[in-house]
Amino acid sequence: MIEIILWVGVFVISMIVMLKGADLFLISSENVGRILGLSAFIIGAVIVGLGTSLPELAVAIFALIKGEESIIISNAVGSNISNILLIIGIVAIVAKQLTVSKNLIDIDLPMLISSTVIFLVIVWNGQIDFGEALILIGSYTIYFLYTILSEKNSDEKSNNNKERISIKLIAMLVIGALALIFGAKYLIDSVVHIATLCNVKSALISITAVAIGTSLPELIVSVKAAIAGKSELAIGNIFGSNSFNILMVVGIPALFKQLQVDPITLQIGVPIMAVATFLFLVSGISKKIYLWEGAMFIMLYIFFIGRLFNFF
């Protein structure tokens, strides 16, 4: 019992260190984006979206090093579910209504649909090999470039910002990255030990506790953005993060070793992620996400947790 409490403590501390690292990275990344004259949506969808997914990527890399490959896909799938059902649900309730002025139908919705469909097709046989990893990474590269170029073509404003990227900003990026690395290492160690001591699969802990924990940066960013009336940033953050999770967080480790999908993730997590993404897309088409939709998302997340632990 004492050993379990000890490793739970390591889990909590590692998560705090990792999230603090993500926070430092995000603050500096946003400032860099602002200095470079990027739009709010690009900062949300690309810089912040990628930045808030760094915990998932760090966890994936150390899971690969530790030989716990099942954690990689479980965490990515669980994070996407948390991002949509839990985070968008909470943000929609906090903001009462999320409104996006950008025409998501033209660029961002199709890209998220494409990312999700590609991932679902690849993951359906229960494994991801080297060739499929290249497809995932290539898809994200196309998504990344297309998003940047489309935004640039639609907004040719010149950047008259006289600020320069300072040494302090670079230091924040480095410190944030190091905190992510060390936090992720000990997080994986704690997950493996807790799973062993409690006689449960590490993938189950990953798709729930780790996924929620690594999604906290997205929650913080999105809630702050919604409170500030920046719905576009809040939703753009989720678009960018979810695409990065299923394409890069899974694709990069799969370059080095074939990944096996845990049965729980394949049978429950993947279908729930597909449903959650579809509902998010339907809400996005109207360019508005209402309070009642947020409540529906949260109830679906509760159902997901219940199914994982056989509550119903």
Image: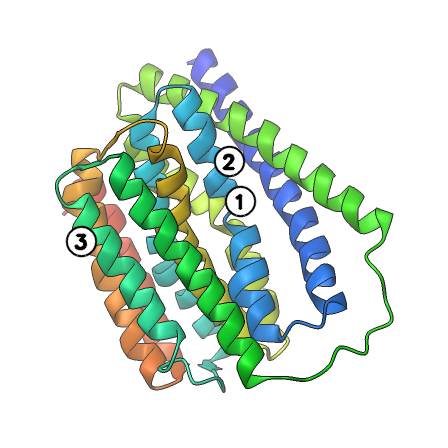
Could you give the CA–CA distance between mark 3 and mark 1, rounded to whole angstroms? 24 Å
Under tag 3, what secondary structure? helix
Residue corresponding to mark 1 = 54
**Disc number at residue 282?**
none
* Residue 299 shows in the view: no
Tell me the residue that label 3 is attached to. Answer: 271
Residue at (33, 75) in percent of width and height? 293
Q: Residues within 10 Å of mark 1 (few under 14, many from 20)?
A: many
**Residue labelled with disc 2:** 58
In the rendering, at what x and y percent does residue 277 appear? 28, 64
Q: How many marks?
A: 3
Indicate left or right for 101 with 159 as reference. left
- Check if mark 2's residue and mark 1's residue have beta carbons within 8 Å: yes
Residue 179 vs residue 122: left or right? Answer: right
* Residue 190 in the image, given as x and y percentages of width and height: 46, 22
The answer for how far apart the CA atoms under marks 2 and 3 are is 25 Å
